[in-house]
Amino acid sequence: MSLVFLHAHDSSEPHGDAVWGTAWTGADTTISISADGSIKQWSASAGQPHPPNAPFPPKHTLGLVSLSVSPDAQRAIFNSIEGLTSFWDLTTGEITGKYESYVRTGDDTEPSWSVSLNPKGQTYASCGGSGNVSIRSAEPSNFGTRLSTLSSGRNKFGMYCSHSPDGTRVAMSSETGQIFIFDLETSALTTTYSSHAMSVRSLTWSPDSSLLLSASNDKRLVLHDVKSAHGGTVASFTGHSSWVLSVDFSPDGRLGLSGSADKTIKVWDIGSRAAVSTIQDTGEVWSVSWRPKPPAVGSVGAFVSGGEDGTVRWWRGAGGA
């Protein structure tokens, strides 16, 4: 099988530096964060600022490295390179919470690197230098307050953390290639995968929370069966010629999506374990995100990407609306 994706349009204006994160929201907007310290929201259908003429949050002095949006597209959190975590109320456009994780107030504090909103609750997860996951309040009244710490038992930098769609687990990847799965009800480490030989840059869960797809500097994507009694690695996807920087699952769970430092985007058929589309971009592709709305009959859907040139790009499957 081979799929064709067409370039639909670009954002009306580029960021001033590389786009380090994108999220296509349930409200059919796209949020992007950049190395220039800016965060913007776009109409996904036109690539114009959303809402029209509304100001974006003030630009941070340092780059923004992590972004997470709630499934209802009402809340977003984002994190700067030194660890300032901000809460953006997408219904009002206001920044209603900030947490300076780099201000050390005790032995358990550390600058956050990656952040992830819990899809079913008012908390978020963060990870960084200790190799542990912190669960913190996402309520504006006490935003950033630590509620618990999930220990990986390894003192390796936490590169990326991500909640499962059902909100029951959180996964964290490390700079040395391990992936840790935590149960949020018991706060216990349930599984450790040693799937990669190098840093794991990105993680994504299947819509039913049963599979986890990882992307690494070792140029591979690895599929894990999280719910199986035996667990472990299901498949390895090869084809990129450089670091894989970002990964996402399609809303129906049939396709995977990856962006790489080799300047390509690849679409993968999860069932056949093969790349079914390769798209050449202009530079390193730092972020990819599927449109969360299930595709129309006869279409494979659409996705958005962000990369080295600062431009947000939308792509659609050939024959789709």
Image: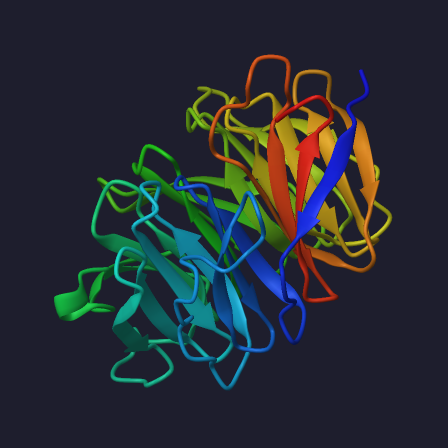
Q: Nearer the viewer, residue 7 or 217?
A: 7
Q: Nearer the viewer, residue 82 or 185?
A: 82
Answer yes or no: is residue 152 visible. no
Quarter of the image for the N terminus: give it.
Answer: top right
Image vertical order of residue 231 relative to residue 305, above or below? above
Picture quadrant where residue 319 is located: top right
Residue 192, x across and y down, in percent: 49, 42
State the count of labels. Answer: 0
Hey, which quadrant is residue 92 in on the image?
bottom left
Quarter of the image for residue 53 reads bottom left
Residue shown at the point (87%, 48%) measured from the top left: 241
Q: Measuring 67% from the left and 34% from the top, which residue is drawn there?
A: 316
- 107 sits left or right of 162 in the view: left
Residue 150 percent coordinates (x, y): 32, 55
Q: Residue at coordinates 73% horizontally, 16% vertically from top-left?
A: 272
Position in image of residue 58 (x %, y %): 42, 79
Q: Can residue 35 be seen by looking at this rendering?
A: yes
Colour scheme of this structure image? rainbow
Q: Quadrant of the C terminus?
A: top right
Farthest residue to the left: give it.
Answer: 141
Q: Is residue 122 left or right of residue 41?
A: left
Q: Residue at x 81, y 51 (%)?
A: 281
Q: Position of residue 263 (x, y in %)?
A: 82, 53
Q: Is residue 149 above or below residue 222?
A: below
